[in-house]
Image (tube, helix red, strand yellow):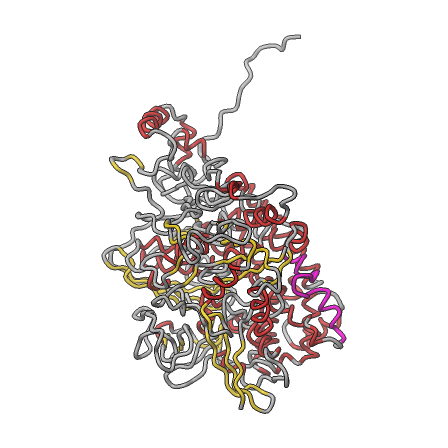
Amino acid sequence: MTRLIVGPFNRVEGDLEVTLDIADGAVRAAFVNAPLYRGFEQILPGKAPFDAMVFVPRICGICSVAQSSAAAQALADAMGLHPANNGRIAANLVLACENLADHLTHFYLFFMPDFARPSYQGHSWFSAAVERFKALSGSGAKTMLSARADFLRLMGLLAGKWPHTLALQPGGSSRPLQAVEKIHLLLLLREFRGWLEQHLFADTLENVAGLASRQALHSWIAASPQGDFRLFLRIAEDLRLEQLGRATDIFLSYGNFPQADGVGRFFPAGVWDGKPHALDESAIAEDTSCAWLSGGAALHPARGDTLPLSDKPGAYSWCKAPRLAGRVLETGALARQVVAGQPLLRALVAERGGNVYSRIVARMLEIATVLPEMERWLREVRPGDPFCIFGNLPDEAEGCGLVEAARGALGHWLQIRRGRIHNYQIIAPTTWNFSPRDAAGTPGALEQALVGAPVGENETMPLSVQHIVRSFDPCMVCTVH
Amino acid sequence: MNLLWLQSGGCGGCSMSLLGADTRDFFATLEDVGVKIVWHPALSEISGREMIELLQACAEGKIPLDMLCIEGALLRGPHGSGRFHMLAGTAQPMIDWIIRLAQSARYVLAIGSCAAWGGVTSAGINPTDACGLQYDGEVAGGLLGSSWRSSYGLPVINVAGCPTHPGWILDTLAALANSEFNTFGAEDLDGLGRPRFYADQLVHTGCSRNEFYEFKASAEKASDMGCLMENLGCKGTQAHADCNTRLWHGNSSCLRGGFACINCTEPGFEEPGHAFASTPKVAGIPIGLPTDMPKAWFVALAALSKSATPRRVRENATADHQRVTPAVHKPANKSRPK
C-alpha cells in the first residue's frame, strides 16, 4: 500500500487536498480534506437579522444567489411571509440564471479541459477535445464565456449585479420589472437558447430535455456529429466514464424554484434510493468526528455550532459530515433530476448508479429543461403588480431556508433572539458530497466514489481521481464557510 | 507579462466577476491587454505537484513573475500559525507562500476587498484573524507591512470591491502591461492604493435615481423607485467607484438593482456600525452626508428641495412603478410662423 497526497486541485472552487491509499493500481481508501476555514457561522451571531443578506452571498462567489435565496427563505420562514408572486418569479429567474451559468462554467472551464491533456493523445476524439476544450485556448470556452456574459445581463436587469446581489428579499425582489424590460429579458433568453442549440446541443432544447431512455440517447448521439455535449458522450463511451466514481446511490434534493402555490417546487424535494422518499429535514444531523471542529454527538443544524479546534486528534478536514438519518447522501444535478423523475437519468442510475458520466448528463439535461421554463416564468410576470411584500420579524424566531445551488442541496438554519442573530448554521452541497468520515467511520460520498479508481504507475495526480472529483462540481469555499 | 493568480480566504467571487467581463473573446482580450496567464485556479490545466513546482519556480525567479494577483483575505490564525489555510499538497500555510512570492513579483495586486483590507472574511469577531495584503481594515500594515514595495517600487495595488468589477481588473492589468502607452505609477493610486481611474469617482455620479436625490424624494422600502440614501442605507454619495457610469453587465448597478450601495470598495465596509439596509439618523438627519459638502448647507438645501418637489417625483418615490408620468408638452393653439 502506498500513500499519495494529491492537491492542490484547480478548476474546483476553492482549495482541496485528497489523501489516497493505493494498492495494485487502484485507490483503496480516500480521505478528503478541505484545507481552508473561514468561519461565517462565527461572524454572523449578534448581527441584525437582515444583515445576513449582505454576508451570506459572500460565502461563495459561484453559488452567491443560492446563498441569498436560502437566507431570504430562512428570514421569510421566521416572519411567516410568502413573497409577492412577481418577486417569487424574479427570484426563480435569478437563481435559474446562476445555476445554468454554473453548469456551463463547470462543463467548459472546470471539467472538460482534462480530456485535452497530453495523456489522452492517440484517442480518436483527442484533436477535437483540444480544439474545443484545451485550458486557456479552447474555442468552446471562448464562445461559452461570451454567451455566458450575455446571459448574465439577466442578473443586471433583475439583480443589479452578479455575484453578490441584495435584490433578493424575504418578501420578493427589490427590482420591479417594467413591461419593456420583460421584452428585453425574453430576447436575452432567446439569444442564449440560440447559443445552446447551436454549440452545446446542435439540437433543440426540447429534444434534449425529452431524452427518456438509454436507447433514445444512443440514437441521438448517432444522429449527428455536432455539438459539445455529443463530443463529451463519445469521449465518455470510449473512456468508460460510466464505470468511474460510483458513490452511495442515495440522492438528496431540497427541490428548487417555488411555484405559485407557495408549497410545490418545479423540481420537487425528496430522497431517492431506488425508491422515492419524502424529505425529512428533521433527520439531518452534522457529525464532527473527523473535522477540526468542536462537538460530541451529531446535531441537527438548528441546534449545532461551528467552532474551530485546530489540534483535534484524528481530524483531517474543516468540513463536517452531514448525514440524513445516519446515511451518506449524494447531492447535485443528478440527484435533482433523479428525484424529479427524469426517465433517462432514473434509467442510468438504476443500471450503474451515480458516476462521472451520469453526473454530467444530468447537468446537460437540466440546462435543456430549465431554460424553456425561464421563458414561461417570464411571461407570468405582471408589471404594475407588487414585486415585494413586507412583514414583521419577531424578536424571537427561527427559520429554515432550503434551496438547490447548481451543485446541490443548500440549507440555512437561523435563530433570532432579542432581535439579533443568535445562531446561523449552513450546510452546503459540497459538505454533503465531500464530507469526511463520521463517528461510525463511514466515509463521505466522494471518499466512497474514489475507491477503485485506477492509478497509473507514474501518476502523481491520477486523472481518474481528477475526473471523479470534478464530476461533483465541488465548491470548497461554500464547504468551509 | 506573466500573471499568477492565487486564492485564499475569500469566496472566489472576484474571479467569477472577471469571467463575466463584457468581451467577445475573453482569452484574446487578455492577450490584447498583454497578459499571459501562468496559472489561474479556474482556468489553468495543471494541478497538484506540477502546480507546486510552478509556484516554486515563480518564487525562485526561474519564471519571471510580473503580476501576482491575490484574491481573498490572508488568514493569519489560529494563533499566528496560518493554519486556517494550508495550501493543499504542500503542508505550508498559504500566507507563507504569498509572502515568498510577493518578494519576486514586479507588481502585486489585491483583487477585491478581502485581499485589500480583510473584507467580509474579517467581519464580526474575525475568527480567522484575516487581513489584507497591506491593510488590516483601515490600518496600514496587513500581511506584508506598510513599508513593503514590489520590485518595481509600488505598494500593493488594491483593486478593491466586493466583488470587484471585471473592468477594474482588466483596466489595471492593461495599464501595468502597457507602460510605454501610459505609465502607471504611484501617482495613479489613491491614498488607499486603489487605481484612481475608478476610485476617484463616486457611485453617486450617474445614478438613475438622481432626480429623486435632488428633491430628497426618498424610497421607504425595498422596490420603491425613490432615492435610497435617506432611509435605506445607501452610501453612493460617499463611495469611491464608477459603478453608475461604467455599469455592471453593461446595464446595471446596485442602485439600479433596487438596493443600497454598501460602500464595498472601502476598508471596514463590512462593519458599518448600523444595519446595512437602514440609514442611521440624528434628529431625523442622516449622519452619512456627502463628505465634501457643509452639513448646514445640505440640510438647508434638502429642506428647500423637499418643499419644491414635483408631485410626479414625490409620488413615484414610494411606488414600484411610475404612477405619475412626465407631463406631455401641449403646443399652444397657434399657427406656425411662415
B76 is higher (above) or lower (below) than B30: below
Residue at x 36%, y 60% (from the top left corner): A74
Q: Which image quadrant is residue A236 in? A: bottom right
Q: How many marks?
A: 0
Say left or right for B127 vs A103. Answer: left
Q: Which image quadrant is residue B296 in? A: top left
Identify the image quadrant of the C terminus of chain A: bottom left
Q: Main secondary structure of the magenta part?
A: helix
Task: Give x and y (percent) for residue B65.
Answer: 59, 59
Decide which of A466, A254 is in the foreground and name it: A466
Decide which of B90, B222 is in the foreground and name it: B90
Magenta segment: does it hold A144?
A: yes
Say left or right for A106 vs A53. Answer: right
Task: Give x and y (percent) for residue A389.
Answer: 38, 48
Q: For the magenta stretch, what is the residue range?
A: A124-146
Say left or right for B4 vs A383. Answer: right
Residue at x 31%, y 79% (from the top left corner): A297
Magenta segment: does it hold A328?
A: no
Residue A457 seen by the camera: yes
